[in-house]
Every structure is written in C-alpha cells, then in structure tokens.
Image (cartoon, rainbow, N blue to C red):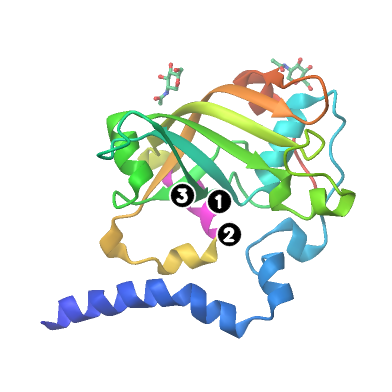
Amino acid sequence: MDGRARGSARAVLAFLLAPALVALLVTPARGRSGQGHGHWDATGLLPPLPPRENAALVARFVTNLCDWGALATISTQEGVRGRPFADVLSLSDGPPGKGTGVLYFYLSPLQQSVGNLQDNPYATLTMSLAETSFCRKYGFDPQSPLCAHTILSGTVIKVSEAEMDVAKNSLFIRHPEMKTWPSSHNWFFAKLNITNIWVLDYFGGPKIVTPEEYYNATFQYS
Ligand SMILES: *[C@@H]1O[C@H](CO)[C@@H](O)[C@H](O)[C@H]1NC(C)=O
Ligand SMILES: *[C@@H]1O[C@H](CO)[C@@H](O)[C@H](O)[C@H]1NC(C)=O
C-alpha cells in the first residue's frame, strides 16, 4: 500500500468512525439538540409557525428549519429497478432565519440516490417539523397534518459555477462536518429545481403552493 492509498484508506476510516467518536464525546442531550449545526433547536430560537393561511410561508418555514429530508427517486438497482426509493439527505437553504428557499445538497456519485438521479433526475423531497422539537412540544404525531410537513417535487440538478459559493456556505453552516468528508468521494453541490409544492399543516388536505409563491414569500427571523 503506497502512502497515498494508505492516506485515503485512513480518510475513509476517519469518515466512518467520526459519527461514533462524536457520539462518545458529546452528551446525549447535546447530541440530540444538534448543537453546532446551526440548528434552531440548539439556540432555543424556534420561532412560532407562520399563519396557516400563508401556506407559501409555512413551506419556507419548514424548509429553513429542517436540516435534512427524505428524497424519493426512481431506483436503477437490480431487483427494484423502476420502483420508488427514498433516502435521507442533508440539505440547507441558508442560515437559520435567513433561508432563500433554494434547497442545496452535497452529493457523491457513490450514493444510490445519485446513481438513480443520473438515470432520471425527477425526485420528490419531504421535510417535516418532526425533525425539530416543534411536534414533540405540542404533542403532534408526525403523521398529523398539525405536525407541519412539506412535499416538494422537481428535478435535482448540479449547481452552476456562479452559484457554488452560495450552495457551499448554505450547506457548511448547517453541516460543518461536510468540510471533512473525503474528497475521494467526489462530492458536488446540487439543488432541487422545484416544480410542485404541497403543504400539510392542517386538516382538509394538502395546500398547493406554486414555486413562484414559495420563492416570493418573505422569510426572515432573527
Ligand atoms: C427547472 O424546471 C423547469 C420546469 O420543469 C424547467 O423548465 C427548467 O429548465 C429547469 N431548470 C434547470 C436549470 O434545469
Ligand atoms: C409576492 O409578494 C407580494 C408581497 O408580499 C404579494 O403582494 C404578491 O402577491 C406575491 N406574488 C406572488 C406571485 O405570490
């Protein structure tokens, strides 16, 4: 094994062990609160849900509060080809309280979802306030519409050179660990080109929000 191979093997090992080491080093309470991840919960700043009649703003609120989502793609894997496939992906639309609504991802061709997207870029992303302390605090079951969640559909596309810095800053402020992910995995920045949005935040079925309404909503908390 030459020096470079050994170095990259060590990097992969460090990548695999890092979460376990972090879990050992932080207290459980701190670990769960997402301390150091630029997360609302960590700072005790969880703002109130926007008025439910403003579904576009509720969608932007959920997007900005969530650090991750489940992305559904169409599988290219032998045995389940053509079937739905969902995986958890870290994401960010900007710093807490200052989201732009643009959902950025840091992806590697080694991920199953990315293999699927190379074949078919259509994807649907779900994020829920069940990821925050909101639903626990009010006793809302994750499947209850009162535990606000959003579903966004579109295509996952690579971020252009011009948008690279915004994508990087948005992600790394919420997911500082990404900075240390091994370069051998060929990480790249991507975003969801949103075409359809559904907001579930109350009884009576999902509310439809257009991408125009979503990006136009003024989201700012301090
Ligand atoms: C985003 O999606 C829209 C609607 O499907 C499409 O017209 C547009 O070309 C897409 N943008 C990019 C950059 O792929
Ligand atoms: C954009 O926001 C402005 C100000 O809140 C509002 O008056 C307008 O109707 C919105 N447009 C769309 C397409 O949502």
Q: Position of residue 101 (x, y in %)?
A: 62, 36
Q: What's the magenta region?
A: 164-174
User: Is any part of residue 81 visible from this angle?
Assistant: yes
Q: Which mark is residue 158?
A: none
Q: Observer-nearest residue: 80 or 183?
A: 80
- Outermost residue, left side: 2
Q: Marks 1 and 2, how far apart in space? A: 6 Å
Q: Which mark is residue 165?
A: 3
Secondary element type, mark 3: helix
Give the residue drawn at x 72%, y 22%: 206
The x and y percentages for residue 15 are: 39, 72
**Is disc 1 placed on a helix, strand or loop?**
helix
User: How would you classify the magenta stretch by its main secondary structure?
Assistant: helix
Q: Residues within 10 Å of mark 1 (few under 14, many from 20)?
A: many
Q: Quadrant of ligand 1?
A: top left
In the image, what residue type sits under mark 2?
Ile
The quadrant in which the N terminus is found is bottom left
Is the distance from the Cβ of mark 2 to the nearest ligand 1 atom less than 8 Å?
no
In the image, is residue 135 above or below residue 181? Answer: above
Q: Earlier in the sequence, mark 2 or mark 3?
A: 3
Residue that numbered label 2 is attached to:
173
The answer to whether residue 20 is above or below residue 63 is: below
Tell me the residue that label 1 is attached to.
170
Which tag, 3 or 1, sits closer to the chain's start? 3
In three-dimensional space, the C-alpha distance between marks 3 and 1, rounded to whole angstroms, equals 8 Å
Task: Please tell me which residue lies in front, 91 or 179.
Answer: 91
The residue type indicated by label 3 comes to Asp
**Which of the two residues, 41 or 70, is positioned nearer the viewer here?**
70
Q: Please name which of the two marks, 3 or 1, marks the residue nearer to the observer.
A: 1
Disc 1 + disc 2, Cβ < 8 Å: yes
Count of numbered circles on the image: 3
